Image: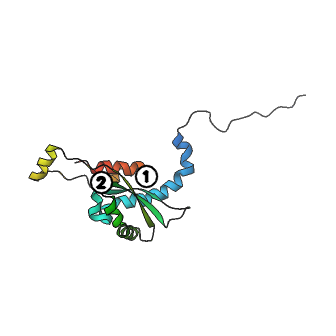
Amino acid sequence: MTPISPTYQRKHSTRLRPLSQLTERLVGPGLKKRSQFLAKLIGDWSYIAGEAASYCLPVDLQFPNNKRIEGTVVLSVVSGRGPKVQMMSQTLITQMNRSFGFAAVSRIRLRQDMVRATMTEHDKSAHKTGHEQDTVPLHTLEKVTSQIQSPELRAALIRLGRNIK
């Protein structure tokens, strides 16, 4: 009499799966925490930065060693405005921390890679006559991009959306 061998059943499928399904469990919790802070920062940016919001925008927020304090905000700045933003950095840090309600940000890092919107001749004439349309409100852009999980992609789309008239 020969013993019956147990049948082997695979627990995992051999079908190809999207990479996002594989990495979501690993990076999902960290991105959710960070993107909430970044989304709030982008949403309140016009109030935080005031006049500087027209030439700089937060694109990343990095916290050291799984902490939620002493973070570094990366700002994308229009070329030539870096020194001005650098001089305003302490005021911006204070305003950001006031917006969060605690000392979440301790440093600002600048990237001078934001492209200034160039005005065409038609835009210049419309600006002079006062018929220029307003840009899309930031809260609308936040609502439209709320389903995007990547904070970098979301910030880039909001930057692009701010220039739509």
Residue 21 position, x and y percent, is 54, 43
Q: Nearer the viewer, residue 24 or 87?
A: 87
Above or below, 98 against 42 in this view is: below
Query: Dot 1, crowdedness within 10 Å: few (<14), some or many (≥20)?
Result: many
Q: CA distance from mark 2 to mark 1?
A: 17 Å
- Residue 41 position in % (x across, y down): 38, 61
Q: Secondary structure at mark 1?
A: helix
Quadrant for the N terminus in the image = top right
Residue 163 x %, y %: 26, 49
Examine the rendering and report whether any part of residue 44 can be seen: no
Asked if the residue at tag 1 contacts the one at tag 2, i.e. Cβ–Cβ closer than 8 Å, the answer is no
Label at residue 151 = 1
From this view, report whether residue 76 is shown above or below residue 8.
below
Residue at the left extreme of this rendering: 129
Q: How many marks?
A: 2
Dot 2 crowding, Cα within 10 Å, few <14, some 14–19, many 20+: few
Q: Which residue is mark 2?
A: 140
Choose the circle earlier in sequence order: 2 or 1.
Answer: 2
Looking at the image, can residue 46 be seen?
yes
- Judging depth in this view, the residue of 134 and 146 nearest the camera is 134
The residue nearer to you, when weighing 85 against 74, is 85
**What's the coloring here?**
rainbow
Q: Please identify the residue farthest to the top as the structure is shown.
A: 1
Q: Amino acid at mark 1?
A: Pro
Q: Residue furthest right?
A: 1
Residue 59 point in image, percent of width and height:
40, 54
Q: Is residue 50 left or right of residue 62?
A: left
